[in-house]
Image (tube, rainbow, N blue to C red):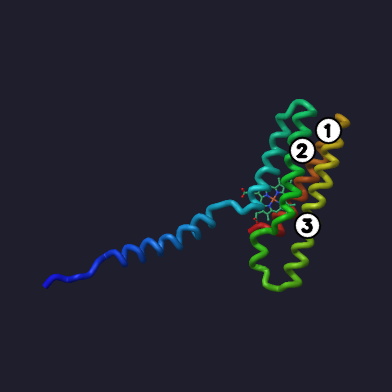
Amino acid sequence: MKLHFSLKPLAVAFAMGFGMLAPAFADDDEDTPLAKEMSVLSKSLKKLRKAETTEEKIKLVHAAQASTIKSLEYIPEMFAQIKDAKEKAKATADYKRLMGLTYVDLCALEIAYLEGDEDKADELKSKLKGLKKEGHRKYTE
Ligand code: HEM
């Protein structure tokens, strides 16, 4: 007796199963939109060490400022774990406060470069590192 069954439905189900898993894996590996902006911010600030002209420095600071503003469109990934609405609202306001301070210092950094004041620029870069430390301590896992 010949068995009349096909493996096709099984193959389809198998493919669908993987189809559903794949995006989950991809999502886990992919940077969040916020991480992408942070990456630009970080690279721009690092490149400042090698920038020689004021023009180059200003261009990098502008890129850092743009990423900081764009970061305000997002919230940290770990906020998904905050279940209490009031806690989440407070954390969101504090996140915006820290990003706002980051933007303010980046504008002060721009002024320092325009004035050719490297000591002031160094001081501001230290302040930015402090904000990064606080933001990451509170809002990254
Ligand atoms: C000069 C300041 C800062 C620099 C250079 C910086 C740099 C970075 C870098 C390199 C990453 C990792 C990106 C990746 O995974 O590829 C990151 C992630 C992150 N940063 Fe910053 N950061 C700064 C300030 C801040 C501040 C002030 C906050 C919070 C108010 C913050 C919150 C976060 C969060 C939450 C992530 C993880 C991304 C996510 O949750 O989606 N960062 N940052």
* Secondary structure category for the residue under label 2: helix
CA gap, disc 2 and disc 3: 20 Å
- The structure residue drawn at horizontal position 46% and vertical position 58%, both measured from the top left corner, is 22
Q: Are marks 3 and 1 in contact (CB under 8 Å)?
A: no
* Secondary structure category for the residue under label 3: helix
x%, y% of residue 135?
A: 73, 54
What's the residue type where badge 1 is placed? Tyr
Instruction: Say above or below: 14 vs 61.
Output: below
Q: Are marks 1 and 2 in contact (CB under 8 Å)?
A: yes
What quarter of the picture does the N terminus occupy?
bottom left
Instruction: Say above or below: 140 vs 121.
Output: below
Label located before the other in sequence (1 or 2): 2
Tag on residue 98?
none
Q: Are marks 2 and 3 in contact (CB under 8 Å)?
A: no
Q: Nearer the viewer, residue 88 or 62?
A: 62
Q: Which residue is mark 1?
A: 113
Question: Is label 3's Cβ within 8 Å of ligand 1?
Answer: yes
- For the image, the number of numbered tags is 3
* Secondary structure category for the residue under label 1: helix
Q: Which residue is mark 3?
A: 96
Residue extending farthest to the top is 53
What's the residue type where badge 3 is placed? Lys
Q: Which residue is mark 2?
A: 61
